[in-house]
Amino acid sequence: MGKPVGGEHNIWREWTEKYARRIKKIRENPNPKLARSNIILYEMMYNQARRELDAWESGSKVPVMYCNENSPVRLYMSLGFRTYHIEMFADRLTREQARRYFDLARGHGFPENACDRVQLTAGVGISGHLPPPSICATVPGDCDTMAQALLYVGRFWKVPTFAIDIPFEVNIEAVLYVKEQLEQIVDFCQQTFPDYIRYDEARLTELQKLYEETWKLESEIFELSATKPCPVSGRDALRMPPIQLYDDPMMVDYFRSFRDELKERAEQGKSVLKDGVERFRVYWMCSAPFYEDPFSFLEERGCAVPCYEEGPGAPSRYAVRDYEDAERRFGRALRHPLEEEAGVLVTCHWGNVAERRIQEVLRNSQRLGIEGIVHFMQPGCLPCNNMAKVLGERAEKELGIKNIYIEGWCQDMEKHDEAEFEAKLADWLNLCLAEKEAKQKSQ
Ligand code: SF4
């Protein structure tokens, strides 16, 4: 018998075990604070891990695309790639896996003070514990260090790399400029992998329709989060839509089921807050410690976390096949599927100029009745840390929103001090509540 694929560690195999355990746990002993629909999410993740493990073990020759950031995953999937969003994979690592890939990345000279996600993208990418890439494609423009991590992975494996150039401007010229680059990628991939990769517009349109449906549900989820007391838990609000699963039709079931649950909770006045009383509500920025639960800590104190900046329905990116929205943003409807993908890329959440993100956060804050913003300051995060103060000052000045700037690590639990982190949150919350009470009394 030959050496098992992945050697000693095979991430897909480890994930089949992890998700099987998680599904079993939710079935047998569900956490009443978390959405029941999460089981669909874990089933999708389990299915993907099983499928990819089988493909790897059976020696599949279908090319693997490593991508990250705001990549046009629907396009890559429709071309026929096995599409691995390595950045999202880095977020799914178990504690043991995270330790392993930190060590690997740092052993290759990656600085410890780059953001955790960047280090882990590099570590997972070069590990060989996933099928190696046939090509790597990134999208600088929102997070350049993340883009560099994937380009490094491409150089490590000596495979072709692409970086899509995204202009700052949001207009039709920007869309067409990006569309042209997508066409170049398509041409290159068809020529490089002629037996497996071909442009399939019908499939791309099918995936876009799936996303259109998903996005509408996400938007409803966002609107339901405005209900007081808050029906959604912070842990569920923090779940970024799993873009690595955009070709799975179960995605629509997942969001529909999540929406229905929230609707039911909102109608019944149910919430995850202590005694069902909401005293304060916050918007969560950047990232969070994945290995602990600061949300329950806040919820126990009456503080709701209905929204994470990349959570369901929160980003104001163009969401495909919305002709009126395209007219408003770009001056005309986008009629070609590649234009649609380009439209999504040029309106990415962390990209463009700072003012666009500020306006998005202010608008969402008004819609949800936000009173405070938690800026999770992850060392090495240029997009969030550089802008946090500017964003916080605008939110305070224009909407009276209170801000906390709190250092933390999303995956490196050895650097994180849970007691200190929670003490800072508690002190800040107490101050906010005291100020709110004083203001109410004076009115
Ligand atoms: S947390 Fe910041 S530095 Fe890290 S990947 Fe996200 S945007 Fe980039």
Image (cartoon, rainbow, N blue to C red):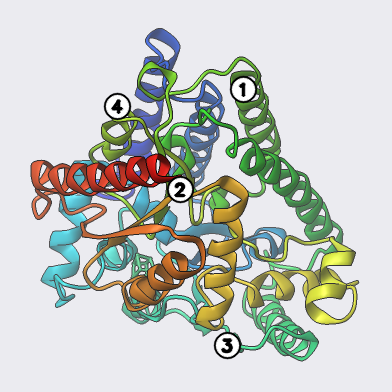
**Residue 52 percent across, percent down from the top left:** 49, 44
Q: Are the residues at dot 3 and dot 1 in contact (C-beta closer than 8 Å)?
A: no
Separation (CA) of disc 4 from disc 3:
45 Å
Q: Disc 2 residue type?
A: Trp
Pick whichever, 8 or 167, lies toward us.
167
Q: Disc 3 residue type?
A: Asp
Name the residue that disc number 1 marks: 261
At x 26%, y 41%, the residue is: 94
Q: Are the residues at dot 4 and dot 2 in contact (C-beta closer than 8 Å)?
A: no
Separation (CA) of disc 4 from disc 1:
21 Å
Relative to 348, 178 lies left or right: right
Which quadrant holds residue 360? bottom right
- Please tell me which of labels 3 and 1 falls first in the chain: 3
- Please tell me which of labels 2 and 1 falls first in the chain: 2
Frontmost of labels 4 and 1 is 4
Separation (CA) of disc 4 from disc 2:
45 Å
